[in-house]
């Protein structure tokens, strides 16, 4: 039975992916900063009928020793780690670059970029010993070089994630590690993530223009998680990109938006935790 470790998975997309993995009889180790939320998530996951095991571990991805502890915990509980997903992330305040504090910038870069880099480094060292495994990093706004006021530092980290993941995949090939490296491109997730910045420390007031775009292109994470997990379980190719919101799909949604009205913001209770 395979084992997956997902960072930042007590809620949102990470939690929804955990559900799908469990339904596919894959052991799951969820991790996050908040133990209370992790316990609740574990209880919810265990309600799903499966032969797989669920474990949780507190982990701050900005600290390399905590990522290593997560790896050691997963190995001790479940043996070999087959899939590792660097999912942990934070949003930035909706401000121009020069209006952000140095602390704001550090939090976004440390979690969204450095956390994925260090996580990939440490798990690659383990997977190379087994000559197998898969590492996936999450793309986001900015990965395709798009730019928007209020998402510049977040976008910078995601643009870097794309380059980093492709570089890691190339190095894995050249060193013949046996480990595949890939990108997950979920598009716009309709969760509390889009309303909260810096680990829920600051609220984001979305403009009507931004809401309009989100209503056209956004999706709830349970829908996207099913697509991403099925793609990961089938994938055997290094440097693969598992992409939900393709350019073609986005173009079609804009073309048909006047006929297909969606309003994710009419009922805020439907904005799932992330």
Image (cartoon, grey):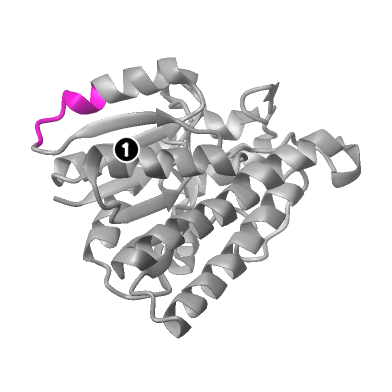
Q: Residue at x 75, y 50 (%)?
A: 152
Q: What range is drawn magenta here? A: 44-50
Percent x, y of residue 34: 49, 21
Q: Nearer the viewer, residue 45 or 253?
A: 45
Question: Mark 1 sits on what residue?
Answer: 29
Name the spot of residue 31 as percent of width and height, x first: 42, 33
Task: Where is residue 158? Give x, y as percent.
Answer: 62, 56
Residue 137 sits above or below residue 259 on the image:
below
Secondary structure found at label 1: strand
Residue sitting nearer the eye, 170 or 126: 126
Residue 189 image offset from top left, x and y in percent: 47, 42
In the rendered image, which quarter is residue 234 located in? Answer: bottom left
Q: Is 116 placed above or below 220 here?
A: below
Q: Any magenta on residue 56?
A: no
Query: Looking at the rendering, which quadrant does residue 22 occupy?
Result: top left
**Can the viewer see residue 138?**
no
In the displayed image of the protein, which residue is found farthest to the bottom? 174
The residue under the point 19% across, 52% down is: 2
- Give left or right: position of 162 versus 38: right
Work out whether residue 111 or residue 194 is closer to the camera in this orientation and state it. Answer: 111
- Is 135 rendered above or below residue 208? below
Residue 48 sits in which quadrant? top left
Residue 191 seen in the current view: yes
């Amino acid at each position: 039975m395979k084992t997956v470790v997902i960072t930042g998975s007590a809620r949102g997309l990470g939690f929804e992916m955990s559900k799908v993995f469990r339904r596919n009889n894959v052991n799951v180790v969820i991790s996050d900063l908040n133990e209370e939320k992790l316990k609740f998530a574990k209880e919810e996951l265990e309600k799903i009928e499966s032969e797989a095991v669920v474990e949780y571990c507190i982990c701050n991805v900005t600290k390399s020793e905590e990522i290593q502890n997560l790896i050691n915990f997963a190995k001790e509980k479940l043996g070999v780690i087959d899939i590792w997903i660097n999912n942990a992330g934070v949003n930035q305040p909706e401000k121009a670059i020069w209006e952000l504090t140095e602390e704001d910038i550090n939090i976004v870069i440390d979690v969204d970029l450095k956390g994925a880099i260090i996580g990939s480094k440490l798990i690659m060292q383990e997977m190379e010993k087994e000559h197998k495994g898969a590492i996936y990093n999450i793309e986001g706004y900015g990965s395709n070089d798009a730019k928007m006021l209020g998402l510049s530092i977040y976008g910078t980290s995601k643009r870097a994630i794309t380059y980093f993941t492709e570089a890691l995949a190339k190095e894995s090939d050249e060193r013949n590690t046996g480990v595949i490296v890939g990108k997950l491109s979920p598009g716009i997730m309709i969760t509390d993530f889009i309303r909260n910045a810096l680990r829920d420390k600051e609220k984001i007031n979305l403009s009507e223009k931004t809401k309009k775009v989100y209503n056209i292109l956004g999706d709830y994470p349970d829908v996207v998680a099913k697509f991403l997990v099925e793609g990961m379980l089938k994938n055997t190719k290094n440097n693969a990109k598992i992409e939900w919101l393709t350019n073609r799909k986005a173009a079609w949604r804009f073309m048909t938006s006047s006929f297909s009205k969606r309003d994710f913001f009419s009922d805020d209770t439907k904005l799932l935790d992330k």
